[in-house]
Image: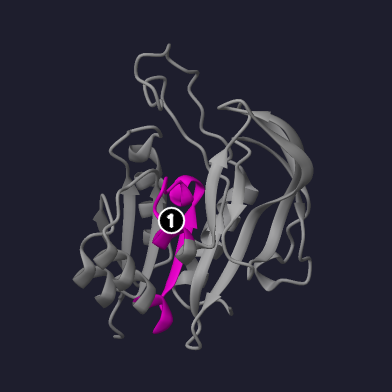
Amino acid sequence: MPQPLVANLVCGSPWRNHDFDFARLRLGQALYDLDGIRVDCHQDYEDGAAIAGGDLLVSYTSQVPVTDKASMTLRRWLERGGRWFALHASNSVAGNQAMARILGTRFISHPAYATFRVEVTAPQEPLLAGIADFDVPDELYCLEAVTGDLEVLLHTRWGGEAFGGVTFPVEDRPMLYRRRIGDAGGGILYLALGHANRPYDKPFPHLPDQPDHRGPWDMDVFRTLVTRGLEWAAGRRPF
């Protein structure tokens, strides 16, 4: 019997501003359902030996501090062919320049939780086979492109006011993109969708509780995107 792959699942945040317990359960179950993958869970990216020795990386994080040493380990692992499936607030990295350059984007802000249209940017892409444009209840993430090499696969078109008093022009905004790193087949697949929170999971604890949100997690299209993202990270789908 072949040896199982090892997935490092990084899920958490010192801010506790999402329902990381829910995301950890759902992503762990999705990895388990793929069979032939063992899952090691982490709260941050600092276990360099584990990440360097793993076969794939999956993250659902927000504002997690990352040391220069951990950032270098991540980049070298990706350059050797490692694949990282990053979801939602994983690119909320504050002032960390190294992580933004690895992921290719940095989270800026989002408007109020609402339903919006996601469009297929690359219909020829095998990862999106059978997927059409869809409406999704979620946080619409507005990102800063840090590198110029993103392959946008899904997008939404939006402009308006977001939290923090930031006003964004109407333009296409990536919801799913891929970024190649190195020449060994490694890289990033980033999915901006997937907000989840309980009433007490909020960025500012002194503010009133929020409604309970699970975004798209029970939507068939989102489950398909997650499964294919995990399969891609495990090398079971083409780059």
Q: Which residue lies furthest to the top in this view?
A: 208
* Pick the front one: 74 or 56: 74
| Image location (x, y in percent) of residue 214 | 51, 33
Location of residue 206 (image quadrant): top left
Q: Name the residue under label 1.
A: 30
Q: In which quarter of the image is the N terminus?
A: bottom left
* Pick the front one: 109 or 9: 109
Q: Give me the residue at 32% from left, 47% from top.
A: 64
- Whether residue 88 appears in this view of the structure is yes
- Whether residue 6 appears in this view of the structure is no
Q: In which quarter of the image is the C terminus?
A: bottom right
Tell me if residue 92 is in the magenta stretch. Answer: yes
Q: Is residue 103 left or right of residue 96?
A: right
Q: How many labels does the image show?
A: 1
Q: In this view, does 84 lie to the left or right of 124?
A: left
* Pick the front one: 102 or 237: 102
The stretch of residues the image draws in magenta is: 77-100
| Image location (x, y in percent) of residue 46 | 23, 60
Give the amino acid type for the residue marked by disc 1 in the picture: Ala
| Image location (x, y in percent) of residue 25 | 35, 45
